[in-house]
Amino acid sequence: MPADVGSPGGLADLQRAMVRAVHGDRQAFASVTAAIDDDGLGANKRLFLHLNTITHALTGVLRQAYPATAGLLGAERFETLARGFLRAAPPQRAELSAYGAGFDRFLVAEGALAEPLAAVARLDWAVQEAYFAADAEPLTAAALAAIPEERQAALGFALVPSARLLPLPAALAWRRWVAFADRGVVAIAEAPGRPDSGPAPVPAAALVWRRPDLTVAARPLSVGELVCLAALAAGESLLDAAAGAEATAEFDLAALLTDGLAGGLFDAAPPGGP
């Protein structure tokens, strides 16, 4: 029986049911098929076309946003989980770039990933967020040099809006993410000032941000680097942030600043700036 779209709420109710149906709601699917004229192509087949199109498209969006997670889980397992995520958390905004937030928590709840490997999904999403974050004019070494030296320590050195600091529960999370990350999307670098030979320090966190050339970059952080950058992100001055970090091992403020200025990590108009 066709829907009575002329009745109060008829069309709106059908449209809401349609949205639920194409996101995998079986009860809504049945109610929509009952409301569609069976003219030529059957109602079930018509709705399945929409369902399959939406599912395929959003699974692709999720796979693009979580490339390392997809590689870690395997294609078949990832697709099954992506379909489950669509049913559990359908899109709430008309922005494909926003779809996928919370997928890491879904994977943990489903038992698909446990810590420390759930951090792989969080790193993937940090790259997605960094790429689509608001623009900002980065602070350059030349601009910093123009500020009197006695004023530099009191500057805020705020991070650009795209910057993300992600604590790592174990080095394994970083290694697995590096192994499966899409190098065409993110540039992965080592921390500055570290020797090419010898064992790499265990990373305490990861830094993800978008460079001025619009590429997303990621690199591991030592405990000291994390303490310093987290303090700067919270609005502390460079002097105070460095003082807190220098109490930890493996902290080189000059190397961190050099790397950050070269990569466009700091906002050109930080709190407390000129």
Image (cartoon, rainbow, N blue to C red):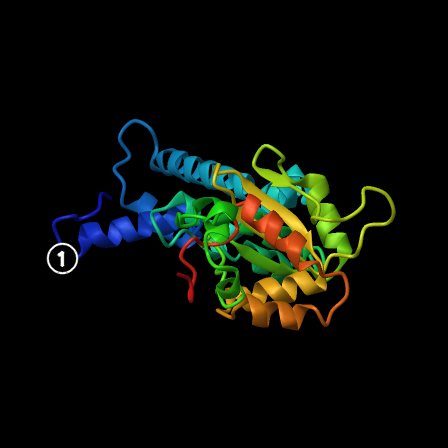
Q: Is residue 129 above or below residue 53?
A: below
Q: Is residue 92 left or right of residue 8?
A: right
Check the picture and name the quadrant holding the C terminus: bottom left
Please determine whether, in this image, residue 186 is positioned above or below residue 6: above
Q: Residue at x 61, y 48 (%)?
A: 259
For residue 194, side relative to residue 270 (left or right): right
Q: Residue 248: percent from the left, percent from the top?
A: 74, 69
Seen in the picture, residue 58 relative to 170 is either above or below; the reply is above
User: Residue sitting at 64 percent across and 46 percent down?
Assistant: 69
Q: Confirm whether residue 112 shows in the render.
A: no
Q: Is residue 238 left or right of residue 27?
A: right
* Nearer the observer, 59 or 20: 59
Q: Residue at x 70, y 43 (%)?
A: 178
Residue 266 coordinates in the image, percent (x, y) = 50, 54
Q: Quadrant of the N terminus?
A: top left
161, 74: nearer the viewer: 161
Q: Does 170 sit left or right of 158 as displayed?
A: right
The location of residue 12, given as percent across then percent down, is 21, 53
Q: Report the front residue among 12 and 248.
A: 248
Q: Which residue is mark 1?
A: 8
Three-letter amino acid code of the residue under disc 1: Pro
Q: Residue at x 65, y 72 (%)?
A: 244
